[in-house]
Structures are given as C-alpha cells and as structure tokens.
Image (cartoon, rainbow, N blue to C red):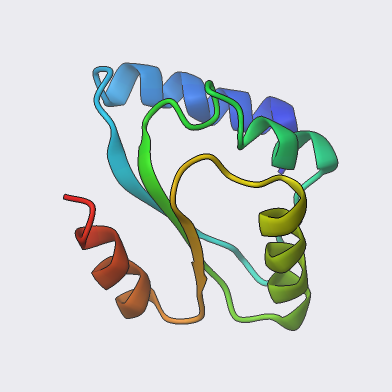
Amino acid sequence: MCSEDFEKVAKAYDVLLNGKKYPIIHFLGKNASFTKGTREFSVTSRGTQYSLAEAYVFSSLPHRLLANSYLKINKPTIPTKFFSKEEDAVKWLKSFL
C-alpha cells in the first residue's frame, strides 16, 4: 500500500464515519507491504483522524519485523497493537468503546 492509497482510504473515512473516531482493525495479507511514506502518513493527524486505536492482524514473520520497527521508528500517536489472531485484536479494540 502506498501513501496515495492510504489517502484514498482516509477520504472514504471522511464520507463514511461522519467525523467520529472508532477503533479500527487492519488485516494484512500475506504479501502486503507498506512504503516509508505510508508508515509516515499513518502517524499524522490526517492518518489517525478517525482512529481511537488501531489493531493490525497478520501471521508472517516479515510483518512482525516491520511491526516492531514501525512502533520504534514511527511511534504511533494512538494506541496501536499487532496480533496474530483476529479474536485477540477485537477483544483489545473493544476496550476503547
């Protein structure tokens, strides 16, 4: 996903979420990758405009390595956590409702 794609998602949220914040879950496909620009955009006020918290669900080792570096380098400004099981991510996100 590139930063332009991320901006398209943000524009869709503008229409769908009516300015409200929600806990958000992301599912990373086996071959998903994120550019430096996307990682940087995801921690801006625009990138987190509708997020109370964000959970990412994935199962690959490369994604786990990327997740660890994302937390250390990009330092998300909202609660952000990574999971290998959807159920665990949903349980964590419900604590923000």
Reply above or below: 70 against 39. below
Q: Nearer the viewer, residue 80 or 84?
A: 80
**Residue in view at x 69 percent, y 74 percent:** 64
**Residue in view at x 60 percent, y 24 percent:** 7
**Residue in view at x 49 percent, y 25 percent:** 10
How far across and down, in percent of the image, does residue 74 sit? 72, 45
How far across and down, in percent of the image, does residue 16 sit? 29, 25
Residue 38: which quarter of the image? top right
Where does the N terminus fall, quadrant-wise? top right
Reply above or below: 70 against 52. below
**Residue in view at x 79 percent, y 34 percent:** 37
Task: Say left or right for 59 vs 1.
Answer: left
Can residue 26 be seen here? The reply is no
Task: Say left or right for 38 vs 49.
Answer: right
- Tell me how many marks there are: 0
Reply above or below: 35 against 33. above
Reply above or below: 89 against 40. below
Can residue 29 be seen here? The reply is yes
How far across and down, in percent of the image, does residue 58 sit? 57, 73
The residue positioned farthest toward the right in the image shown? 36
